[in-house]
Image: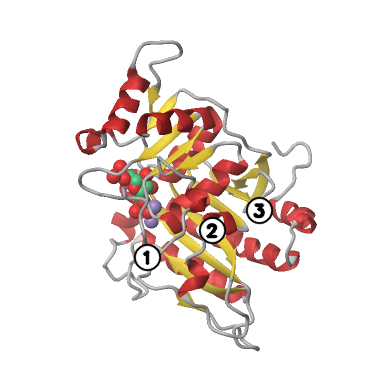
Amino acid sequence: MFGKQHRTLGEFIIANQDSFQYSSGELSRLLNGIRLAAKVVNHEVNKAGLVDILGDAGDTNIQGEDQKKLDVLANEKFIQTLKNREIVCGIASEEEDDYISINSQDEKHQNKYIVLIDPLDGSSNIDVNVSVGTIFSIYRRVTPVGTPVTLEDFLQPGHKQIAAGYIIYGTSTMLVYTTGDGVNGFTLNPALGTFYLSHPNMRFPENGKIYSVNEGNYIHFPQGVKNYIKYCQREEGDRPYTSRYIGSLVSDFHRNMIKGGIYMYPKSSKASNGKLRLLYECNPMAFLAEQAHGKASDGRQRIMDIEPTELHERVPFFCGSKKMVEKAEEFMN
Ligand code: AHG
Ligand code: MN
Ligand code: MN
């Protein structure tokens, strides 16, 4: 890979900043902040298997510091890094009940961007050495600069996002993001600590053969979803499809984008809106999906058209290859 010159993420951000319609330098700085936090969290994720040796979460380590759970740690690292950049006026995170208002150092509340994050997605996979991720979503504030952010700044529909992406801590670590001009993927060279453009212009195949759903919940799914799952399993045409479910949205999405597939987290008789969070899980993934020629729906309507009413609201989620999502919608309507 390193025989010829490959473009780094830093170079790519600069080279593409002019195509961005707002203040391009600021978004570049913000993305660079995420790039830095990704490397820090990557380092922590890689050490996760050593917690039994270095100390469990809740213990005190040799330096007298409390050992933290990785999702708490990832949350802190991202918030810290973004605060330091003085571009972000507010952050909302899966790990925080409320949004955080950030005051820039010299002038009050002059920053323009808000960030929503799921700092560690798929966290139940950490203890078993299976890949996890981070998801982020970026908006411009809607309240005037010079005033503190309000909930209104965070409750924007997904189509207002100006950037979104994820980091996948997998067999290699990748950062995948969009600013509304396609999706590009960068792989970390851990020896150099540099992300290289490895997956330019990523696209979902229009159709696919993988369906990803927690089938253990089958009995609780609505009839339409049950029927669609049966359709996936039927021997006919290019079916039965293959079932693949990692239990970490980022990883399931990433595989399906490369190979073609559909990810589903439907509502059920136990959870009337499913499990996934609209603002920092579904919207950013939906933005990426659409930018990669895929589709994201709650079963009836476009995810990015939903008007949010709560910071941590949940929504049923169907996302992936366009034709597969359309077929699933057919079964549900
Ligand atoms: P998180 O670790 O951030 O709480 O998210 C886990 C999510 C998502 O990543 C994954 O696809 C889904 O929960 C798995 O849920 P089930 O275990 O219910 O299938
Ligand atoms: Mn998550
Ligand atoms: Mn999480």
Q: Quadrant of the N terminus?
A: top right
For the point 30% across and 44% down, the residue is 267
The residue that mark 2 highlights is 137
Residue 146 lies in quadrant: bottom right
Q: Residue at x 55, y 69 (%)?
A: 114
Can residue 248 be seen at all in this image of the molecule? Answer: yes
Rendered location of residue 235, percent (x, y): 36, 11
Between marks 3 and 1 in the image, the one whose residue lies nearer the viewer: 3
Q: Which mark is residue 31?
A: none
Residue 197 quadrant: top right
Q: Where residue 54 appears, x then y in whole percent? A: 33, 60
Q: Of marks 3 and 1, which one's residue comes earlier in the chain?
A: 1
- N-terminal-most mark, 2 or 3: 2
Name the residue located 42 percent from the left edge and 41 percent from the top edge. Answer: 300
Q: Which residue is mark 3?
A: 179
Marks 3/1: CA–CA distance: 25 Å
Front-lying residue, 132 or 249: 249
Q: Is residue 49 visible?
A: no
Q: Is residue 203 above or below residue 302?
A: above
- N-terminal-most mark, 2 or 1: 1
User: Relative to 234, does residue 179 appear above or below in the rendering?
Assistant: below
Image quadrant holding the C terminus, namely top left
Mark 1 sits near ligand 3, with its Cβ under 8 Å away = yes
Q: Residues under labels 2 and 3: Cα distance?
A: 10 Å
Q: Secondary structure at mark 3?
A: loop
- Mark 1 sits on what residue? 95
Tag 2 near tag 3, CB within 8 Å: no
Residue neighbourhood size for the residue with mark 2, other residues' Cα within 10 Å, grouped as few (<14), some (14–19), many (≥20): many
Q: Determine whether the beta carbon of the residue marked 2 sits less than 8 angstroms from the nearest atom of ligand 2.
A: no
Q: CA distance from mark 2 to mark 1?
A: 15 Å
Q: Residues within 10 Å of mark 1 (few under 14, many from 20)?
A: some
Compare residues 7 and 232 and report the one nearer the observer.
232
